[in-house]
């Protein structure tokens, strides 16, 4: 393993400004002659296993997201939710180690104008939605990170639950008061898991889940929920789902 590197801010901005000029690199080339050590910084305390990451499945089939989320999550050691919102990390990975996967999973349109917007969405990370849903690699890490907080038999089982319930995945991951608090995440996933296990008897309404998430997010913003015990947070979450 080696320490994870990331791009300097000016290097990210330059790449964004020159997407059109670099379309050939995104489609079939690479950035090895464009990015050098002067464009990089080292993220101390975060390690990456390049051999493990090389096992990522290069396919456009969405079903590979389950295994690939696990691979990305377990290839990077020491990354936390705060750092995982740094676009410089994910922009570096999608332009280097993860370039082949990124352009295979997210097939670049033939039209150049469409391609520029597509690349901006999937090769970079613009805003909260960019980290959680759009960037080719960060979306995998975040899915696995959230799934790792629930009580599942395997991590793949938790990832599959989140990816199967796309709306729930977005409602959980895209709320900072929820996605950055381990107690909250764990409690929500455990409640949802119980609900889905009994869905044949009592269907899980999307509107109910959305309203519950809003309540939890409001409490997270209004109270020092970070300082609460796991039992206290669990009660808040359970009550939010009861209506």
Image (tube, grey):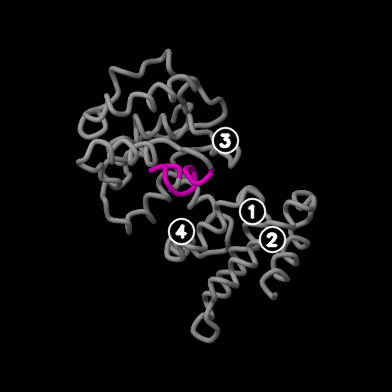
Residue matched to label 4: 159
For label 1, the residue is 178
Closer to the chain start, of discs 3 and 1, is 3
Residue 131 among magenta residues: yes
| Front of the two marks 4 and 2 | 2
Q: CA distance from mark 2 to mark 1?
A: 8 Å
User: Could you tell which of marks 2 and 1 lies nearer the N-terminus?
Assistant: 1
Residue density around tag 2, few if under 14, some if 14–19, many if 20 or more, within 10 Å: many
Tell us which disc is closer to us: 3 or 1. 1
Q: Residue at x 45, y 62 (%)?
A: 166
Relative image position of residue 157 (x, y in whole percent) = 45, 63
Q: Earlier in the sequence, mark 4 or mark 3?
A: 3
Q: Are marks 4 and 3 in contact (CB under 8 Å)?
A: no
Name above or below for residue 26 compared with residue 65.
above
Name of the residue lying farthest toward the bottom: 201
For the magenta stretch, what is the residue range?
128-138
- The residue closer to the viewer here, 50 or 171, is 171
- Dot 3, crowdedness within 10 Å: few (<14), some or many (≥20)? few
Q: Position of residue 243 (x, y in %)?
A: 70, 75
Residue highlighted by disc 3: 83
Q: Secondary structure at mark 2?
A: helix
Q: Is residue 205 left or right of residue 227?
A: left
């Amino acid at each position: 393993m080696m320490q994870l590197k990331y791009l300097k801010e000016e290097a990210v901005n330059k790449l964004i400004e020159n997407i059109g000029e670099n379309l050939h690199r995104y489609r079939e080339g690479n950035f090895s002659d464009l990015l050098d050590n002067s464009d990089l910084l080292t993220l101390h305390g975060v390690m990456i296993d390049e051999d493990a990451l090389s096992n990522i499945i290069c396919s456009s089939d969405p079903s590979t997201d389950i295994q690939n989320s696990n691979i990305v999550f377990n290839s990077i050691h020491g990354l936390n939710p705060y750092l995982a919102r740094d676009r410089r990390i994910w922009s570096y990975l999608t332009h280097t180690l993860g370039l082949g996967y990124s352009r295979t999973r997210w097939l670049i349109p033939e039209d150049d104008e469409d391609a520029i917007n597509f690349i901006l969405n999937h090769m970079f990370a613009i805003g909260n939605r960019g980290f959680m849903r759009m960037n080719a690699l960060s979306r995998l890490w975040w899915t696995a990170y959230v799934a790792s907080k629930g009580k599942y038999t395997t991590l793949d089982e938790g990832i599959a639950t989140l990816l199967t319930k796309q709306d729930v995945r977005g409602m959980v991951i895209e709320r900072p008061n929820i996605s950055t608090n381990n107690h909250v995440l764990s409690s929500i996933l455990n409640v949802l898991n119980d609900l889905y296990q009994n869905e044949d008897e009592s269907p899980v309404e999307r509107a109910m889940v959305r309203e519950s998430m809003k309540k939890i997010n409001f409490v997270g913003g209004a109270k020092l929920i970070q300082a609460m015990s796991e039992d206290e947070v669990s009660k808040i979450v359970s009550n939010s789902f009861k209506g």
